[in-house]
Image (cartoon, helix red, strand yellow):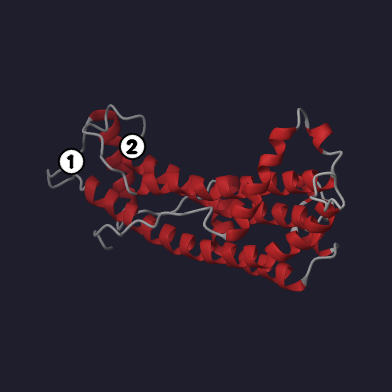
Amino acid sequence: MSTKFLKRYVLSSDNHEFVGRIYDLSIVAMHFNSYDDLAKHADCKYAYDVDYALSMLTRRVESLNMVGGMLWPAGMPKDFKEFPVSRYEWLNISADVFLTRSISLVDCAIILVNEVLECGLSVESCTMANLKKKVVPKPIFDQLRMMLDGQGHLRKERNGRVHHGAERGFSSDDQMFRTGALFEHRFGGARGSNGRPLPVKRFFREGLIELQREFNGVMRTVVKQLDHLYDLLYPEFESRFSPKFRSGPFARRDVE
């Protein structure tokens, strides 16, 4: 396995024009004391609901930078015996967070599409199967389907880890790594049959780099996929918001 750290890919969640447009409109919430008051105005309610769904998605994107921080640590503990987890557990936790949060990006994207297209599904009912029963433009549905299909191997691993107790290997000798990391964490270190310290640091580095490689690849793909989804959703949003706004009380009207 390679032992050279990769360059970290940092995600940005708000570069697209669609995101900026929704965020600009979100200021509408400051003019009302409650959601019930806001919901009396169709344009305000629509903008608020879309912003809420979009914010869930962008926050989830940004949260993956936390995973990046775990995979590109700025500094390592001097003594893992005093650290809350072992090196092996560090990688396991990083993998769990990476899988669950990256998988949920498509789930959040489905919720956003539901709000923009006013499909009327509850958050709990926002699935591809239920969305297919609604009037959804084919390019948008196909984009979601492509995003979902692209997560196939990740979803399979996530399900195996979360529901079936499956674990992935992180090094060229995972059994030795797991044992060595446990002894390092609990007793300060371990030696092999040859009397030499187990190469726990090397195994840990191997695992980090493998996760770094997977993280960078998935995140580059996700950003491109979301940008294309936003391209498709932007005109759909405007075609619904503009008529609501023009007929609402906040539209500018010419005074003769």
Give the mark nearer the N terminus: 2 vs 1: 2
Asked if residue 151 shows in the view, the reply is no
The amino acid type, in three-letter code, at marker 1 is Arg
Q: In percent of the image, x 25 and y 39: which residue is there?
A: 76
The foreground one among 238 and 188 is 238
Position of residue 243 in the picture relative to residue 232 (left or right): right
Q: Which residue is mark 2?
A: 86
The foreground one among 195 and 34 is 34
Q: How many marks?
A: 2
Position of residue 89 in the picture relative to residue 192 (left or right): right
Q: Position of residue 166 (x, y in %)?
A: 51, 50
Position of residue 137 in the picture relative to residue 107 (left or right): right
Judged from this view, the residue extending furthest toward the left is 195
Q: In percent of the image, x 20 and y 45: which residue is there?
A: 198
* In this rendering, the label closer to the viewer, 2 or 1: 2
Q: Regarding mark 1 in the picture, which secondary structure is present there?
A: loop
Q: Position of residue 255 (x, y in %)?
A: 84, 50
On screen, residue 232 above or below 33: below
Q: Position of residue 239 (x, y in %)?
A: 78, 63
Q: Are marks 2 and 1 in contact (CB under 8 Å)?
A: no
Q: In percent of the image, x 46 and y 54: which residue is there?
A: 11
Judged from this view, the residue extending furthest toward the front is 256
Q: Within 10 angstroms of label 1, few (less than 14), some, or many (20 or more) residues? A: few
The amino acid type, in three-letter code, at marker 2 is Ser
